[in-house]
Image (cartoon, rainbow, N blue to C red):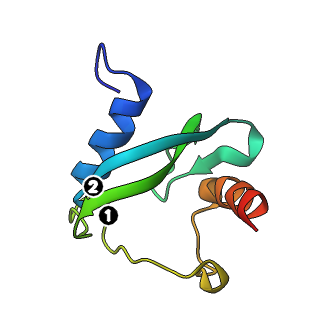
Amino acid sequence: MEPGEEMIEVAKRELWEEVGLEALDLELLDLFSGPELYYQYPNGDEVHNVVAAYLCKDYQGTIRGDGDEVQDIQFFELDRLPSHISPPDRPIISRFLRDQL
C-alpha cells in the first residue's frame, strides 16, 4: 500500500502490475487474518498476513506474469483448481467457493 492509497486502489494497481489486467468492477469479498494466514518463505522470512480480498467482476487485458512476483498465471474452472495453492491463499479461496457454490 502506498501512502494515501485506498484499499480498492491497491487491489486495482496490484492486479495491473502483477498480471496485466485492468479491474473495471471490484467488490470486497472480506478481510482475512489469523493463524491460517501465517506463512514462512523459503528464505526463512515469516509473515502474518492481513488480506483485503476482492472479487473482480469485470476486467480488460490479457493475463501475463510479471516475471518477478508472478512466475505463472492461469485461469481455472472452479471444479478444477490446482492442489498446490499457497497456504495463505487457501482460506480465502475456500470462503469464495463456499459463498459461490
Q: Crowdedness of circle 1 by 10 Å Cα count: few (<14), some, many (20+)?
A: few
Which percent across, then down, holds residue 40?
57, 51
Point out the tag, 1 or 2, that comes first from the N-terminus. 2
Quadrant of the snapshot with the C terminus: bottom right
Q: Which residue is mark 1?
A: 70
Which percent across, then down, holds residue 87?
64, 60
The three-letter amino acid code for the residue at tag 1 is Val
**Foreground: disc 1 or disc 2:** 2
Quadrant of the snapshot with the N terminus: top left
Q: State the SS at label 1.
A: loop
Please say if 56 is above or below 48: below
Q: Quadrant of residue 28?
A: top right
Please say if 81 is above or below 14: below
Residue 47 located left or right of residue 96:
left
Total marks shown come to: 2
Q: Confirm or deny contact between disc 1 and disc 2 (CB under 8 A).
A: yes
The residue located at (67%, 60%) in the rendering is 90
Q: Is residue 28 visible?
A: yes
The three-letter amino acid code for the residue at tag 2 is Glu
Instruction: Say which mark, if any, is on residue 18.
Output: 2
Which percent across, then down, holds residue 30?
65, 38
The residue located at (59%, 77%) in the rendering is 84
Residue 23 located left or right of residue 36:
left
Which percent across, then down, holds residue 97?
71, 64
Q: Is residue 69 visible?
A: no
Residue 67 located left or right of residue 93:
left
